[in-house]
Image (tube, coloured by chain):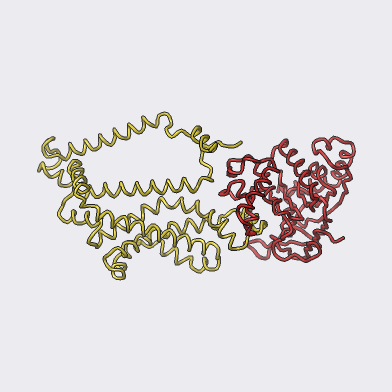
Amino acid sequence: MTPALALERITCTFAAREDRSKRYTAVKDTTLVVAPGEFVSVVGPTGCGKSTLLNVAAGLLEPSAGSVMVNGDPLTGVNRHAGYLFQADALMPWRNALDNVVAGLEFQGLPCGRARERGEQWLKRVGLAGFGDRYPHQLSGGMRKRVALAQTLILGPRILLMDEPFSALDIQTRQLMENELLELWSADRKSVVFITHDLEEAIALSDRVVVLSAGPETHPIGEFAIDLPRPRDVSEIRLTPHFIELHGEIWHRMKSEVLKGYAQQQQ
Amino acid sequence: MRNNSNEARKRPAWKPGARRTRIYQLLLAAALLLLWQLATSPTLLPPIFFDDPNKAAFFFGEPLKAAARIWVWFTTGEIYRHLWVTLIETLLAFVIGTVSGLVVGIWLGLAPGASALFDPYIKAANAMPRVILAPIFFLWFGLGIASKVALGVTLVFFIVFFNVYQGVREVSPVVLANARMLGASPRQLLRYVYLPSAMSWVFASLHNSVGLAFVGAVVGEYLGSSEGVGYLIQQAEGVFDINTVVAGIVVLTAFALALDGIVSLVERRLMVWQPKSGETERL
């Protein structure tokens, strides 16, 4: 089967702005293959270049070396098959919730009436019916994430790229959002690359967890299949013995990298 | 609807104490005018400073006479022609300067090569005291409206330009990347991301530029014209009629305030998406 997304031997090197000879290699020789319908989480210590990898997959960043294949075709420009959920607020603050949700349809040139109709449906699906006329600053962090989710999913991307989307939310809101994400995902099984530094979140959501080393020159150091049964409830599954077993196993592999990353940040 | 009622409830138009402040403000104005009237009147007080009792009034004018002047202007309709000319010049300078500042600001904000090339020239043009361009504009455009508009445009343009330039360069990279991922073409990015983002900076600059558009119009009239409020002031000065000068200043100030109010009104209508300080309307 052709993978939905294949990052092959990706290396990303950045030249320092002041001194062109000083280079920083964020990601080195990394291969990540995502099957259609697969939910893959990428975990790693902070500052290890996880977002860099995702930006490469999105086509927002061109890798220094390596290739990106989407459904078997090489990627040029922005990845049209992918939706991207950003870590930071990415909603247009001058558009209300509904106008934000329909932005992608508007860019495609869909007539306003039909776009709004679908936008209302999606607002309802993310639990924000009746909030269409609110501006982002009038919404809570969790609600803004829901709007962003609807904004991305309304275009029906086959691949969903998520960059620590829930890291800014409090723990309760976060678990609610994670469950909602799983429910939305189970409806049509997109391929998902979910970046996080939270191992529990990664295990609870995914089919597979990829562990990255500390930066610079980040590369995968381990891969773990998560064979927990679906559908899952993220707050309950954390308490099952198999979850704890998996967590222990992966954490054992991650620990030294996390400490390394922490030591680097202390410098 | 719910939105509006909420705002009305949470942000009352008059905070407690605001009414009292307004009363004090009016009292202060009345006191200053009274003092002015007393100090300059040739008959009410013995001359303290000047040997001639009429001299204070000659130098500082008398508020009552200035008010009478304004009254005569508006009742006889004598001022309308001049006011009309000044307002037209101001509005034209304001609109042309704002639009050209917006266009050039967006262009240079998006074209790093061009902005690097023009950078020293823009800095020089902005540093130059632009009133000295007036004689050149008189030569080019004559003594009519056009030369005053040109002067006003040179003042307004740079204010708006620098703000838009800054605004375009500080568009949130995340919002931009998100719009690209949602499939926006470069053209759509300009229309749906750069332009609205720059608009908040434009509005921040419009209050300044309204005032400067007025400066351009009035200074231009003052330096050479046959109509306009600046011309009236200049004529009055020629015959040492200080009361008319004061009356002209008062009329101009009132209209500048009115224009500024209109800008605020438009701003409030168009910038509803911006969080206002102290507004706690989260759910």
Q: Is residue B246 visible?
A: no
> Which residue is at a point 19% across and 54% down the rendered structure image?
B237
State the image quarter where residue B173 is shown.
bottom right
Q: Position of residue B150 (x, y in %)?
A: 35, 64
Q: Position of residue B125 (x, y in %)?
A: 41, 64
A244 on left or right of B107: right
Question: Chain B hue?
Answer: yellow
B68 on left or right of B11: left
Q: Is residue A223 visible?
A: yes
B269 on left or right of B59: right
> Which residue is at a point 38% across and 57% down the rendered structure image?
B94
Q: Quadrant of the N terminus of chain A?
A: bottom right
| In the image, residue A69 above or below residue A166 | below
| In the image, residue B56 above or below residue A222 | above
In this rendered view, identify the residue nearer to me: B267 or A113. A113
In this rendered view, identify the residue nearer to me: A9 or A229. A229
In this rendered view, identify the residue nearer to me: A63 or A137. A137
Question: Chain A hue?
Answer: red
Q: Position of residue B34 (x, y in %)?
A: 21, 35
> Which residue is at a point 72% across and 47% down the rendered structure image?
A164
Q: Position of residue B20 (x, y in %)?
A: 36, 29
In this rendered view, identify the residue nearer to me: B71 or B156. B71
